[in-house]
Amino acid sequence: MTERPLRIVFATARYAPFIGGVETHVRSVSRLLADAGHAVTVLTSDPSGELPPHEVDDGVEIVRVRARPRRGDLYVAPGVARVLAERRWDVVHVQSYHTFVAPIAMRAARRLGLPYLVTLHGGGHSSRLRHRARSLQIRALGPLLRSAHRLVATASFEVELYGRLARVPAESFVLIPNGGAEVLRPDGPRVSDGSTIVSMGRLERYKGHDRAIAALPTVLERVPAARLWIAGEGPDEARLRRLARRHGVEDRVEIRGVPLSRRAEYVGALSKAALAVLLSEFETHPLSVVEAASLGCPVLVADTGGSRELAERGWARAVPLRATPRRTGEAMAELIESPPPPVAVELPTWEDCCARLVEVYRDAVASRARA
């Protein structure tokens, strides 16, 4: 490293052992930055009070402060401000805005004169009320977001959307897509089984698995052997099973998640699937779609958010989010019967993501020195 290592602190509401998109992002980036010689701390909250308040994992320091309430996801963690004030940092990177951890960290950084970045990690929520309220959250956070050195967007649409809501100019954003693991490609050419539909994503209401189930009877009219595999885990499983029974397709729907330790099994099954679907209400940069497309599997997405961007690149077909089950089913059947030719998909890497972040961090440090 030709320049001095940076002292970087990630302020985020949740971190490992919790699982999720933001947790994966922070864990991947922090480890690579630590490997590169930077001093990296993840400052996070622990509503349970049962996790270690301090530990080091793969060279990354993890500091956990207590949060309230114990249940729910609108954590308040005043200890975040205390930890930021106790140590010397070069840059503070706030990851996600969905809890009160973000404004606490941003206010503390601004008060301490520390440059800070914010990656918003926009996403859906199973509560429709909470999902609708997120635009109000962004507007309320506007003054703090406008004080950030940069806002990091992981998809292009975020620049216009969040810029408008928070009244932040486009030049205050930097576009840095998430990285992704290299696909474990099966040996030999892809051969579709002609019948399996994979609905990807955690079992949450907003992920759209219910749309795939409701569309399945229409698919079966044209593809009698079709079956739906919902590849995920989560709190919505019981409701989805009831929905499958209501639509008379219980015997054609399998709900089964595959753990990371058996990732090769999942990739192998996806590479043989007739179709992959992600009919989610909101996605920022859905790597599951990128992965499926890179394997040559046809993909159908809901025409919204980051999924729309991937459809515009030709990596997926899009159907309106509020399309009827019949229209969605017809779109699914068409892709199974007449699959499009595979597209060339270049997977982003976490190394690229980290390299771009370090550039922004050093620019933030330089700007502070000039001030």
Image: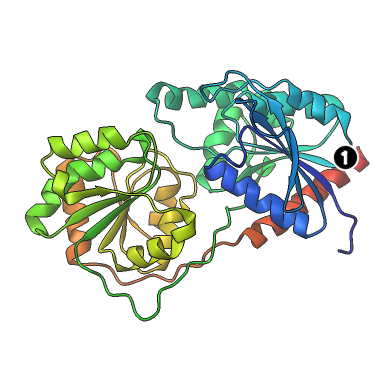
Relative to 187, residue 34 above or below? above
The residue carrying mark 1 is: 368
Which residue occupies the foreground of this view, 310 or 27?
27
**Label 1 is placed on what type of residue?**
Arg
Q: Residues within 10 Å of mark 1 (few under 14, many from 20)?
A: some
* Image position, residue 316 (x, y; %): 35, 58
* Image position, residue 104 (x, y; %): 71, 23
Relative to 230, residue 70 above or below? above
The quadrant holding residue 98 is: top right
The image shows a total of numbered marks equal to: 1
On the rendered structure, is 303 left or right of 20? Answer: left
Do we see residue 327 in this rendering?
no
Which residue occupies the foreground of this view, 112 or 162?
112
The quadrant holding residue 146 is: top right
* Residue at 81%, 24% in the rendered image: 82
On the rendered structure, is 131 left or right of 95? Answer: left
Which residue occupies the foreground of this view, 266 or 126?
266
* Image position, residue 29 (x, y; %): 67, 52
Residue positioned most to the top? 69
Relative to 312, residue 327 above or below? above
* Residue at 12%, 60% in the rendered image: 225
* Residue at 57%, 21% in the rendered image: 70
Secondary element under disc 1, as helix, strand or loop, is: helix
Do we see residue 56 in this rendering?
yes
* Residue at 49%, 44% in the rendered image: 284
* Image position, residue 321 (x, y; %): 30, 40
On the rendered structure, is 287 left or right of 201? Answer: right
